[in-house]
Image (cartoon, helix red, strand yellow):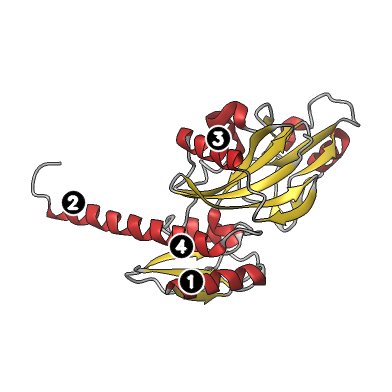
Amino acid sequence: MNIRWVIQNNLISQLEFKLLKESCDKLGVEVEEIEVIPFSAELPKFTMDEKTNIYYGSTTLMYNIYHQLNNPTGLFFDESAFSMENYINKWGKHMLNSDADITSFKEVTQKQYPDDQIFFIRPDDDSKSFAGTTMTFKQIKDWGSNITQYDNVTLTQDTKIVVSEPYNIRKEWRTYIVDGKVSTASRYRENFRLSKSGTDIPDDMIQFVEDRCKEYQPYGAFVMDIALCGDNYYIIECGCINSVGLYDSDVKKLVTDISKYVNKKSILDKCVVTSKKSYKGTL
């Protein structure tokens, strides 16, 4: 395969870095390690030639690659597609927060709720600007009224956020999807506690995910987090597969499936370009 994996070697889980590198080595796929400067817009130097790069690292790195390299083939991201508002529009009742309020800090502070009412709050986009959490309405108002900077990421009164009621979630899984199929999956939480398992992967949960992929996919490769509430499965959110935690997934299979997908896509893209250059008729 005419590809290489460009993998960030700092500020990420060293176990995940090791598993990714070992998986590439076993497959005979080239790996290039890069070191990222924290919170910097500067891209580290890496090879760009006839091979197609597949990227893995922090959210900051992926955002910089997306904006500075014009969303290259080995990066699976689209700002407009990776948002809670888009997921709710596409999947409706299958979303855990299908009745959520897509709002802003400015708007939510003007609403009238009891100060002690509890809500779940998270960013609308995939920027990880702050972690999803439960807060009382008073805490949300206080934060929104005094917002300046949070975790070195600047938020504003107009930042789009998702506000919904909290749910009693029994289990949560992360599924890694390549070309409409679940490549691998891992449970990562049970009864609100971190609990990783690569074997507790129900067949009906996988079927639920692949059924949703038949309806819509934000990208050719992405992750979809699933919640079990009562006896029903719901989509929590999706995310960029280039910058997510791997938990107890089958990393070798994931690397294999992504590598094959990108290699095939690169060949098809080159064929399209070649056919356009050789076409002598009128387009």
The residue singled out by tag 2 in the image is 276
Number of the front mark, 3 or 1: 1
Q: Residue at x 49, y 63 (%)?
A: 255
**Residue picked out by circle 1:** 24
Do tag 1 and tag 4 residues touch (Cβ < 8 Å)? no
Please determine whether, in this image, residue 32 is positioned above or below residue 187: below
Q: Residues within 10 Å of mark 2 (few under 14, many from 20)?
A: few
- Residue topped by disc 4: 256
Q: CA distance from mark 3 to mark 1?
A: 33 Å
- Image location (x, y in percent) of residue 230: 74, 32
Furthest-top residue in this view: 112
Q: Amino acid at mark 1?
A: Cys
For the N terminus, the image quarter is: bottom left
Question: Considering the numbered disc 1 on the image, is that residue within a helix, a strand or a loop?
Answer: helix
| Image spot of residue 58 (x, y percent) | 61, 62
Q: Is residue 264 visible?
A: yes
Q: Nearer the viewer, mark 3 or mark 4?
A: 4
Marks 2/1: CA–CA distance? 34 Å
Q: Give the residue drawn at x 83%, y 23%.
A: 112
**Residue where numbered disc 3 is placed:** 86
Judged left or right of residue 37, residue 43 is left
C-alpha separation, residue under disc 2 versus residue under disc 3: 33 Å
- C-alpha distance separating marks 3 and 4: 29 Å
Residue 107 position within the rendered picture, expressed as x and y whole percent measured from the top left? 72, 30
Q: Secondary structure at mark 2?
A: helix
Residue type at mark 2: give it. Answer: Lys
Indicate the position of residue 218 as horizontal and vertical percent values.
49, 42
Q: Earlier in the sequence, mark 2 or mark 1?
A: 1
Left or right of 52 in this view: 86: right
